[in-house]
Image (cartoon, rainbow, N blue to C red):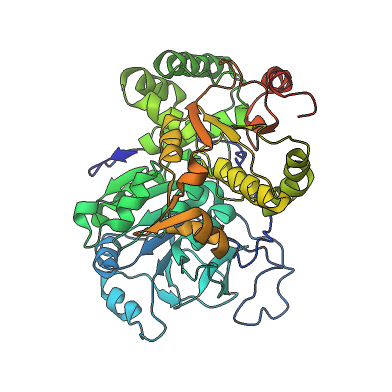
C-alpha cells in the first residue's frame, strides 16, 4: 500500500494466470446471494433476446469500477473532470441509491466530462470511452462484457452493490480490472477491493481526509489491499500512467527462462528471504511472475533489473512484495457444499467416536484472516448439538501472514459477511456492532491463531482433522511432496 502524491511515471510487465486461494462454487446455504453470477444463473431484468450463446468477448477492455456513497457526487466530479483527453477507459459507477429517489447523476456529471454517461440496463454491452451508472436497488454483474442485473439481498437484508460488482469485475477482467473507492459511509467495497487485487487488478482509494465521508475509503485501506491512496482528482493521472505498462497489455512477465532474468528472480528471492524470512523460490512460477509483474506495474517500470534495485534499496518494498505474494481471498463457509460434506461425513462420525471429555483437535493450515477456522468451529458446535454431547475443542489455525493472523485473532468482520453467513448463525455465533460482527467468546476461545511457516516450522501433532484448502496449489511439486508427509505425521491414526 502506498500513499502517493501525483507521480507521472512510466509502465510495467506482467504474469500468467494466478491460482485463487479459494475456488468459489455456487452456494447452497439458505438465503445466500452469490457474489457473481454465471450466465446460466443470472436473472437479467431485460430480455437477452436469445444472445446468451454468443462467443466470449475478447478480454481487452480495461474496466474501472468506482464505488461511491455519501459524499460521492463531489468526489466523482473531481475524478471525471481530470480525465485525460481521448480517454478510452470504461468506467462503471456503483452507488447506494434509494428506489424512491430519482437520480440526476448523469446530468450532474455531464458538465465535468466529454464521455457519454449511460444508465446500466440488463444485457447492455460495455464499450470503451464511456461512463455507466447503476440503477437503484439492483446488483450489477459483468458477464462476457455485458451487464447483468439481479435483485438478491444478503440473508440479513443488507445491500452491498459495490462488493458485488467488484467481485464480478475481478472474475471477468482479472488484471484488467481497476477498483476505486471514493467517499461513503459504512464499508461496502472493502471485500471487493480484496477480490480485485487477488486477481491481479489494481486498487485505489480516495485519501480519507479528502473525502466528505471517509468510512468507505478507511475500510478499503484497512484491508492492506489498496495500491494507491490519492485525492480523487489525482486518480485519473495515475491510472493513465499505469495504462502504458506491459502488465495491462500482455499476460506474462518477460520469459523467466532467459538466463539473466532467472538470476534476477533468484536475487529477489534472496532479498525476500533475508528481509522477511520467507523463501518463495519453490512457489509456482506463474504465481511469482504475476505478483512481481504487478509490483512493477505499481512502480511503473518494465525492466526486471530495475525492480531488483527497488527491492534491494527500498526498505519497505520487500514487505509490500511479500504482502502481494500472500494475498488470500477467503470468506465464511466458502464453497458451502464442501462444509456441508465435512459436517456430515467427518465431524459427526468423529464426535460419535469420542468418549466424554476427549478433546477434538483440528489444524487449519493457511487460515488467512480466520474465516475458515471460525467456520469449522461453528460446524463443530452445531454437530455436537446434533449429537447431544459437548466435547472440548482445540483448533490450531496458522498462516505466515502476520497481518492476516492479527485480523483473525480479533475476530471482528465487516457487515458484508452477511452475504455468506445465515441469519440464524449470525444471531447465534456473532455479536453485532457498528457495521461489524464479532465472533462470540464461546467460539473464539476454541481457537489458537499463530504465525507458522508450513515449510520450515514443526507441525502440530495428534490432530484429528487437518483443513488445508487452496494452499498447495501455490507450491511446486517438490514442496508438495514435503508437506503431505508432514500432514500425515501430524494426524492421529484414522485422522
Task: Quarter of the image for the N terminus: give it.
Answer: top left
Front residue of this view, candidates 194 and 125 = 194
* Relative to 135, 478 lies left or right: right
Task: Quarter of the image for the C terminus: give it.
Answer: top right
Residue 46 in the image: state x and y as whole percent.
61, 82
The residue drawn where x is 64% and y is 20% is 461
* Relative to 449, 205 lies left or right: left
* Relative to 388, 101 lies left or right: left
The residue drawn where x is 41% and y is 34% is 403
Asked if residue 430 is positioned above or below residue 368 in the image, the reply reads below
Residue 228 in the image: state x and y as whole percent.
33, 44
Residue 34 in the image: state x and y as whole percent.
60, 62
Asked if residue 84 is positioned above or below residue 365 in the image, the reply reads below
Taking the image as drawn, is residue 197 in sight?
Answer: no
Quadrant hosting residue 64: bottom left
Q: Number of labelled discs?
A: 0
Front residue of this view, candidates 424 and 373 = 424
Taking the image as drawn, is residue 468 in sight?
Answer: yes
The residue drawn where x is 52% and y is 69% is 140
Front residue of this view, candidates 425 and 365 = 425
Asked if residue 478 is positioned above or below residue 18 in the image, the reply reads above
Residue 105 in the image: state x and y as whole percent.
33, 77
* Relative to 372, 136 lies left or right: left
Quadrant hosting residue 226: top left
Amino acid at each position: 500500500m502506498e500513499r502517493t502524491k501525483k507521480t507521472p511515471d512510466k509502465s510495467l510487465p506482467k504474469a500468467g494466470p494466478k491460482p485463487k486461494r479459494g475456488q468459489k462454487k455456487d452456494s447452497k446455504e439458505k438465503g445466500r446471494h452469490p457474489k457473481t453470477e454465471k450466465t446460466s444463473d443470472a436473472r437479467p431484468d431485460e430480455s437477452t433476446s436469445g444472445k446468451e450463446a454468443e462467443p466470449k468477448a475478447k478480454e481487452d477492455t480495461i474496466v474501472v469500477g468506482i464505488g461511491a456513497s455519501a459524499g460521492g457526487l463531489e468526489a466523482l466530479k473531481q475524478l471525471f473532470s481530470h480525465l485525460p483527453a481521448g480517454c478510452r477507459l470504461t468506467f462503471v459507477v456503483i452507488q447506494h441509491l434509494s428506489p424512491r429517489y430519482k437520480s440526476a447523476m448523469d446530468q450532474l456529471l455531464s458538465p465535468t466530462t466529454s464521455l457519454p454517461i449511460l444508465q446500466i440496463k440488463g444485457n447492455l454491452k460495455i464499450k470503451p470511452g464511456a461512463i455507466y451508472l447503476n440503477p437503484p436497488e439492483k446488483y450489477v454483474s459483468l458477464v462476457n462484457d455485458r451487464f447483468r442485473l439481479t435483485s438478491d439481498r444478503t440473508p440479513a437484508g443488507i445491500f452491498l452493490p459495490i462488493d458485488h460488482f467488484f467481485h464480478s469485475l475481478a472474475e471477468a477482467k482479472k488484471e484488467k480490472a481497476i477498483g476505486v473507492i471514493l467517499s461513503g459511509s459504512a464499508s461496502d467495497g472493502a471485500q471487493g477491493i480484496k477480490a480485485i487485487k487477488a486477481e491481479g487488478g489494481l486498487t485505489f482509494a480516495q485519501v480519507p481526509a479528502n473525502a466528505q465521508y471517509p468510512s468507505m475509503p478507511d475500510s478499503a485501506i484497512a484491508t492492506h489491499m489498496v495500491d494507491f491512496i490519492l485525492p480523487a482528482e489525482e486518480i485519473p493521472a495515475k491510472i493513465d500512467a499505469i495504462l502504458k505498462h506491459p502488465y495491462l497489455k500482455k499476460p506474462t512477465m518477460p520469459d523467466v527462462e532467459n538466463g539473466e532474468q532467472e538470476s534476477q528472480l533468484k536475487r529477489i528471492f534472496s532479498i525476500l528471504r533475508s528481509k522477511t524470512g520467507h523463501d518463495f523460490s519453490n512457489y509456482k512460477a506463474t504465481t511469482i511472475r504475476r505478483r512481481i509483474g504487478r509490483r512493477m506495474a505499481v512502480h511503473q517500470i518494465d525492466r526486471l533489473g530495475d525492480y531488483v534495485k527497488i527491492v534491494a534499496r527500498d526498505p519497505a518494498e520487500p514487505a509490500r512484495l511479500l504482502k502481494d505474494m500472500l494475498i488470500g481471498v477467503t470468506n465464511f463457509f466458502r464453497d458451502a457444499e464442501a462444509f456441508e460434506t465435512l459436517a456430515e461425513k467427518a465431524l459427526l462420525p468423529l464426535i460419535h467416536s469420542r468418549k466424554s471429555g476427549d478433546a477434538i483437535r483440528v489444524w487449519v493450515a493457511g487460515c488467512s484472516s480466520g474465516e475458515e477456522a471460525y467456520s469449522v468451529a461453528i460446524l463443530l458446535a452445531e454437530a455436537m448439538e446434533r449429537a447431544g454431547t459437548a466435547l472440548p475443542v482445540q483448533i490450531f489455525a496458522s498462516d505466515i501472514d502476520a497481518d492476516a493472523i492479527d485480523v483473525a485473532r480479533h475476530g471482528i468482520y465487516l457487515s458484508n459477511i452477511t452475504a455468506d453467513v445465515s441469519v440464524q448463525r449470525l444471531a447465534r455465533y456473532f455479536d453485532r456492532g457498528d457495521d461489524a460482527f464479532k465472533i462470540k467468546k464461546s467460539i473464539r476461545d476454541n481457537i489458537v491463531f499463530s504465525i507458522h511457516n508450513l515449510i520450515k516450522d514443526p507441525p502440530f501433532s495428534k490432530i484429528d482433522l487437518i483443513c488445508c484448502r487452496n494452499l498447495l496449489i501455490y507450491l511446486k511439486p517438490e514442496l508438495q511432496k514435503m508437506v503431505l508427509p508432514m500432514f500425515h505425521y501430524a494426524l492421529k491414526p484414522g485422522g
